[in-house]
Image: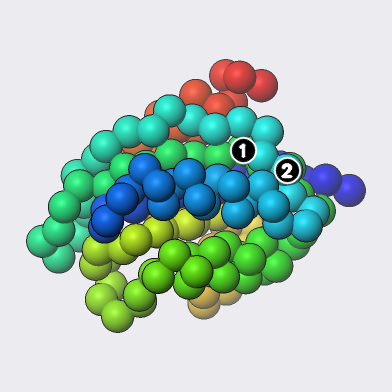
Amino acid sequence: MRDSAYIALGSNVGDRLAYLARARAAIGAIAGCRVVASSTIEETAPLGPVPQGPFLNQMLAVETTLSPRDLLRELQEIEAGAGRARDVRWGPRTLDLDIVTFDNQTVNETDLRVPHPEIPNRDFWQRELAELRERG
């Protein structure tokens, strides 16, 4: 059975466009995943208390046979391959990949919450979700 997931991509270090492009390709190459649509890329101000440069953000609509946990594991491997460092919470990052929603599934674990609890606080995610959902 295929589920639909929405994955947020963000980058604010280095060649931000290239990191997003590599992430799109890598997500599309995950066994059991197919990218069906991508939102417009937009630049946003960083969130949180750490001074840093602006982000490029984009969202993907993906069909997948993976569980939310397995999808998260794959996304974290893609982040690691892009040199993602997790040393400063809310800090700058080469690549940030978040599962925003996953069909009608809810996950409430220490390191995985779906739907993502920050949706109400990220207007750019709301715009990107609306854009993708309009495309059907």
Q: CA distance from mark 2 to mark 1?
A: 9 Å
Residue bearing mark 1 = 61
Three-letter residue code for mark 2: Arg
Is 135 in front, or is 12?
12
Residue 8: horizontal and vertical position, in percent? 47, 47
Q: Which numbered dot is residue 34?
A: 2
Q: Is residue 57 left or right of residue 14?
A: right
Judge whether 89 appears above or below 3 on screen: below
The residue lying at 57 percent from left, 19 percent from top is 134
Residue 44: horizontal and vertical position, in percent? 24, 40
Q: Which numbered dot is residue 113?
A: none
Three-letter residue code for mark 1: Ala
Residue at the right extreme, as displayed: 1
Badge 2: residue crowd in 10 Å (few <14, some 14–19, many ≥20): some
Q: Can you say which quadrant of the picture contains the C terminus? A: top right
Residue at the bottom extreme, as displayed: 87
Comes first in the chain, label 2 or label 1: 2
**Image-quadrant location for residue 109:** bottom right
